[in-house]
Image: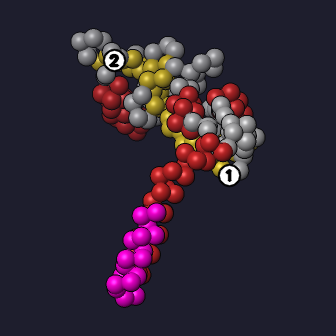
């Protein structure tokens, strides 16, 4: 063994400082090997059925989604046990839901997935079937009635920030008069029409 021979040479010809340095280097090499090879060895030892995901915990401030909708979606996307589950894939699936603005998905030892959801907050309707979020994202909820209390805005793709800013300016001018705008939209030529 090369380590044994190295140890014999160093211990015979040098003092305690060199022996200490050698043990530190051997310890560091062992730790590096454990870090690099540990996950691979663990994956050979742990079977996909070991440590199954039994719980999905969902939190967030829900107004338009129900936590059980997200739980069902996550449960269907979970494949494998605690060590095999792909949390990025689950997050990507959650982000496909129109009402979800952002999601965090983490493993929770020993048998759970924890999901935190940030919902889209609609500030206006966009056209007849979509909504505009505070981040100027146009999204179309599935199988849900759109909120009636929101103003209806329209415009070509990419005009969302401008249309929203114009709506806010007009609304601010009408507030002292206690009047409300119900619809605004721009045409392809960006001319604003107030209805």
Residue 48 at x, y = what percent?
Answer: 68, 36
Residue 150 at x, y = what percent?
Answer: 51, 27
Magenta portion: prevailing SS class: helix
Closest to the observer, 19 or 72: 19
Q: How is the protein colored in the picture?
A: secondary structure
What residue sits 50% from the left and 13% below the top? 128
Where disc 2 sits, the SS reads loop
Residue under numbered circle 1: 109
Where disc 1 sits, the SS reads loop
Picture layout, residue 68 above or below residue 182 = below
The magenta stretch spans residue 125: no
Residue 38 at x, y = what percent?
Answer: 55, 52
Residue 113 at x, y = what percent?
Answer: 66, 43
- From the image, state whether disc 2 or disc 1 is nearer to you: 1
Residue under numbered circle 2: 157
Local crowd at mark 1 within 10 Å, few (<14), some, or many (≥20)? few
């Amino acid at each position: 063994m090369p380590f044994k021979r190295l140890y014999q040479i160093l211990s015979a010809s040098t003092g305690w400082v060199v022996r200490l340095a050698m043990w530190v280097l051997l310890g560091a090499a062992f730790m590096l090997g454990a870090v690099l090879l540990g996950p691979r060895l663990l994956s050979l030892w742990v079977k996909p059925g070991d440590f199954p995901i039994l719980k999905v915990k969902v939190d967030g401030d829900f107004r338009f989604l129900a936590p059980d909708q997200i739980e069902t979606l996550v449960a269907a996307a979970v494949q494998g046990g605690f060590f095999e589950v792909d949390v990025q894939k689950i997050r990507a699936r959650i982000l496909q839901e129109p009402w979800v603005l952002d999601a965090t998905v983490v493993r929770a030892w020993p048998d759970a997935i924890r999901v935190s959801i940030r919902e889209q907050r609609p500030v206006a309707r966009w056209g007849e079937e979509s909504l505009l979020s505070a981040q100027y994202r146009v999204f179309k909820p599935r199988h849900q009635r759109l909120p009636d209390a929101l103003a209806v805005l329209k415009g070509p793709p990419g005009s969302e920030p401008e249309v929203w800013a114009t709506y806010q300016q007009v609304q601010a001018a009408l507030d002292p008069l206690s009047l409300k705008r119900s619809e605004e939209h721009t045409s392809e030529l960006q001319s604003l029409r107030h209805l």
